[in-house]
Image (cartoon, helix red, strand yellow):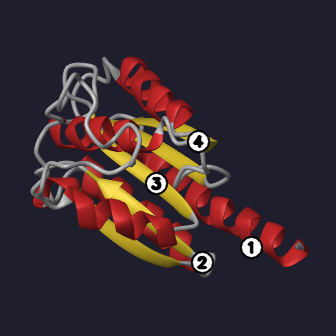
């Protein structure tokens, strides 16, 4: 069982990183292998809306902009589940998460065949370090992304500095439960 955890904050010691560590612990406790990806450390440029607005992403389901996206996108095929954790910036995902998700959506959403997410659970976490404003709009944006790529939505969790005492535990438990359910499902087949 392989789970990819995306984090997308430049702060490697902040709330987003703590959420990533909690998710990693829960997933590993359930016996899965974790692949951690910090999107801020990837060289992924924004979508170029190639050609008439659609390049090879529409029909070939790959992006022609050459950077770290290609290898990361290809590596996702081996995953059984995904966890996306982003800080909340102005009510949205971080810029690195938006850049990645924009290109991912273009390559995956219009596939006639199964997407890389189809039938795979996704846990989405929005981490608001300040007031907590923007959590709902950020989670809504993540929900749209995972709807477009046909992911199985496992849970959406908002966390702030004020509620992190119990929400970090919830993220750990959500990661563990997501993998446990997958293990049971795979054991039944």
Is there CB contact under 8 Å for labels 1 and 2?
A: yes
Secondary structure, mark 2, is loop
C-alpha separation, residue under disc 4 versus residue under disc 2: 26 Å
**Label 2 crowd bin: few (<14), some (14–19), many (20+), radius 10 Å:** some
Asked whether 130 or 142 is in front, the reply is 142
Q: What is the x, y in percent for residue 48?
A: 13, 33
In the image, 60: left or right of 9? right
Residue at which label 4 appears: 112
In the image, 60: left or right of 151? left
Quick check: 84 above or below 36? above
C-alpha separation, residue under disc 4 versus residue under disc 3: 24 Å
Residue 172 seen by the camera: no
Quick check: 60 above or below 18? above
In the image, 180: left or right of 20? right
Residue at which label 3 appears: 83
Nearer to us: label 4 or label 3: 4
Q: What is the x, y in percent for residue 119?
A: 67, 52
Which of marks 3 and 1 precedes in the sequence? 3
**Label 3 crowd bin: few (<14), some (14–19), many (20+), radius 10 Å:** many
Asked whether 118 or 37 is in front, the reply is 118
Secondary structure, mark 3, is strand
Asked whether 139 or 160 is in front, the reply is 139
Residue at the outermost right position: 188
- Which numbered tag is attached to residue 1? 2
Quadrant of the image containing the C terminus: bottom right
Residue at which label 1 appears: 183
Which of marks 3 and 4 precedes in the sequence? 3
C-alpha separation, residue under disc 4 versus residue under disc 1: 28 Å
Which of marks 2 and 4 precedes in the sequence? 2
Is there CB contact under 8 Å for labels 4 and 2?
A: no
Residue at 45%, 44% in the rendered image: 108
């Amino acid at each position: 069982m392989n789970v990819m955890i995306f984090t997308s904050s430049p702060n490697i010691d902040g709330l987003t990183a703590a959420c990533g560590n909690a998710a990693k612990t829960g997933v590993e406790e359930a016996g899965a292998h974790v692949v951690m990806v910090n999107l801020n450390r990837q060289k992924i440029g924004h979508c170029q809306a190639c050609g008439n607005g659609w390049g090879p992403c529409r029909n070939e389901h790959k992006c022609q902009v050459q950077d770290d996206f290609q290898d990361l996108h290809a590596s996702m095929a081996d995953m059984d589940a995904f966890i996306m954790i982003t800080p909340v910036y102005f009510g949205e995902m971080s810029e690195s998460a938006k850049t990645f998700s924009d290109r991912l959506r273009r390559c995956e959403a219009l596939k006639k065949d199964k997407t890389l997410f189809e039938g795979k659970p996704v846990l989405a976490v929005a981490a608001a370090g300040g007031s907590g404003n923007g959590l709902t709009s950020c989670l809504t944006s993540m929900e749209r992304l995972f709807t477009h790529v046909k992911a199985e939505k496992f849970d959406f969790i908002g966390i702030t500095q004020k509620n992190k005492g119990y929400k970090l535990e919830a993220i750990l438990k959500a990661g563990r439960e997501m993998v446990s359910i997958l293990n049971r499902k795979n054991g039944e087949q």
